[in-house]
Image (tube, helix red, strand yellow):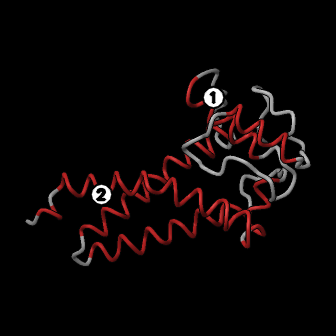
């Protein structure tokens, strides 16, 4: 067993990838989903009745990347498997926090009243406050900039606010 294939090092690689995924997700959200990939992502910014939205295809694509990495890792490349684990863990947290807590797409209904979770929900609601793909704020999923700064940036941008423009603590995103 080499240094790079010891379980503590592989665990650290997975953790590092998990943390780096916030930057990857931020860039993908800002430049792909709010750029050339708006065709799929638009469904996430519009009211809908069904359990699924076209935007969910992004999760399928990202899971496909992780599956390919797991396969490559299974061919004798444990570092690649560790990368796949980090990506998968980020996807799991995204599913729990973004889809569950923020968008209430799960059966439980909890609106946080304080701390990190409240700030995360408020920041994402401010992201959805803008009508259209331009002038949005807060593109991360597990990190949220301070809410007061986001509100100030939205007000100064002159962006047209959509149905979520009020952004009260109690308002659901969709």
* Residue 140 position (above or below residue 166): below
Please tell me how crowded label 2 is: few (under 14), some (14-19), or many (20+) other residues with Cα within 10 Å.
many
> Where does residue 49 sit, x and y in percent of width and height?
82, 50
Circles 1 and 2: CB atoms closer than 8 Å: no
Mark 2 lies on residue = 13
* Residue 77 position (above or below residue 17): below
In the picture, the disc for residue 88 is: none
* Residue 70 position (above or below residue 174): below
**Image-based side of 48 in relation to 145, left or right:** right
Q: CA distance from mark 1 to mark 2?
A: 30 Å
* Residue 95 position (above or below residue 106): below
Please tell me how crowded label 1 is: few (under 14), some (14-19), or many (20+) other residues with Cα within 10 Å.
some
**Image-based side of 25 in relation to 36, left or right:** left
In the picture, the disc for residue 118 is: 1
At x 89%, y 42%, the residue is: 163
In the figure, residue 100 lies in which quadrant?
top right
Which quarter of the figure is the N terminus placed in?
bottom left
Q: Nearer the viewer, residue 76 or 115?
A: 115
Which quarter of the figure is the C terminus placed in?
top right
At x 44%, y 56%, the residue is: 20
Disc 1 is placed on an element classified as: helix
Q: Nearer the viewer, residue 4 or 157?
A: 157
In the figure, residue 149 lies in which quadrant?
top right
Among numbered discs 1 and 2, the one appearing first in the sequence: 2
Disc 2 is placed on an element classified as: helix
> Where does residue 111 sit, x and y in percent of width and height?
67, 27
């Amino acid at each position: 067993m080499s240094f790079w294939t010891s379980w503590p090092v592989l665990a650290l690689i997975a953790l590092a990838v998990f943390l780096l995924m916030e930057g990857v997700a931020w860039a993908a959200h800002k430049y792909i989903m709010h750029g050339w990939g708006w065709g799929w992502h638009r469904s996430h910014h519009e009211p809908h009745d069904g359990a699924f939205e076209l935007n969910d295809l992004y999760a399928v694509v990202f899971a496909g990347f992780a599956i390919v990495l797991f396969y490559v890792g299974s061919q004798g490349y444990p570092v690649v498997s560790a990368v796949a684990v980090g990506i998968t863990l980020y996807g799991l947290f995204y599913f729990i926090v973004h889809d569950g807590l923020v968008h209430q797409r799960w059966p439980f209904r909890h609106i946080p009243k304080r701390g990190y979770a409240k700030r995360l929900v408020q920041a994402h609601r401010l992201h959805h406050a803008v009508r259209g793909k331009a002038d949005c704020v807060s593109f991360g999923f597990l990190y949220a900039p301070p809410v007061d700064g986001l509100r100030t940036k939205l007000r100064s941008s002159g962006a047209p606010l959509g149905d979520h423009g009020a952004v009260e603590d109690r308002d659901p995103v969709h």
